[in-house]
Amino acid sequence: MKTSLLKSVAVALVLSLATNAWGGNDRSPANNGIPTEQSADRPDVMPQYPGGIEALMNYITSEIDYPDDAFRNGLQGTCLVQFVVTKTGHVDQVKVLRSISPELDAEVVRVCSMIGNFEPGQVAGKPVNVSLALPVKFKLESNIPYISEELLNRANNGDMEAQYLVGYSFYHGDGVPLDWLVAKHYLSKAAAQGHEEARELLKKTKQYLRNELD
């Protein structure tokens, strides 16, 4: 289903951090193809992200880009992703347990693969690998009829200046509800085409998204 008017993007991140043993004595392949040790079933201390769950939510929200086809076609839902926080605090073995669509799944895997700097989990005072499950919810809210359809169509069809103008409007709440997620979606597209003002505003947008729950 094509959408002609803008839909507000909300990537709602409900974090359910649950341990999950890989089972048996097998080793699972890592992202780089090198086997890793199996994860702990019940660690004494769970892995901790700097700043806690809210900081992790803000990081993922600021980095996720709603893929164009999924955005235009109204795809939404919850992707359940699993990854291992290694005993060095890095993320490995990212895989989707419950899929939404190939493009949304791929974006979740991409962003989760970049997460780092965890304090690793521990068993008996020693760092161990711990497997975590994370549901990431993509939600498209109701149409917002404050931007002209002509400008929006231009932005959705790749017009760099239109993408910047739509992003700018949502960044500032200029004639539309302030929405940094929508701003980020369009500013990212303009910045990717070399729009310098969009690139600078995108940096500020990502920073606001990371700090808004602090």
Image (cartoon, rainbow, N blue to C red):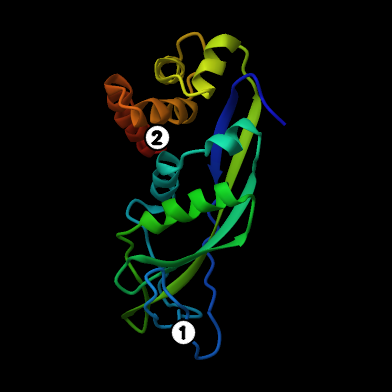
From the viewer's perspective, tell me whether residue 162 is left or right of residue 204.
right
Q: Residues within 10 Å of mark 1 (few under 14, many from 20)?
A: some
Report x, y in % for residue 77.
Answer: 65, 45
x, y (%) of residue 78?
A: 63, 49
Of badges 2 and 1, nearer the viewer stands: 1
How far apart are the two marked residues, 2 and 1, measured between alpha carbons?
37 Å
| Residue 92 in sight from this viewpoint | yes
Of residues 63 and 39, the one drawn nearer to the viewer in this rendering: 63
Classify mark 2: residues with Cα within 10 Å, few (<14), some (14-19) or many (20+).
many
**Residue 142: x %, y % from top left:** 67, 25
Q: Earlier in the sequence, mark 2 or mark 1?
A: 1
- Figure quadrant of residue 141: top right
Q: Quadrant of the N terminus?
A: top right
Image position of 6 (left or right of 171): right
Q: Is residue 164 above or below residue 174?
A: below
Q: Amino acid at mark 1?
A: Arg
* Amino acid on which disc 2 is placed: Leu
Instruction: Determine which quarter of the picture holds residue 210.
Output: top left
Residue 146 can be seen, yes or no = no
Q: Residue at x 53, y 54 (%)?
A: 15
Residue on which disc 2 sits: 209
Q: Position of residue 101 (x, y in %)?
A: 63, 49
Is 122 rendered above or below residue 74? below
Q: Nearer the viewer, residue 73 or 6?
A: 73
Q: Residue furthest right?
A: 1
Q: Residue at x 35, y 34 (%)?
A: 206
Residue drawn at the location 50% of the way across and 88% of the way down: 26
Give the label on residue 27, or none. 1
Secondary structure at badge 2 equals helix
Quarter of the figure that contains the C terminus: top left
Left/right of residue 18 with respect to residue 168 in the rendered view? right
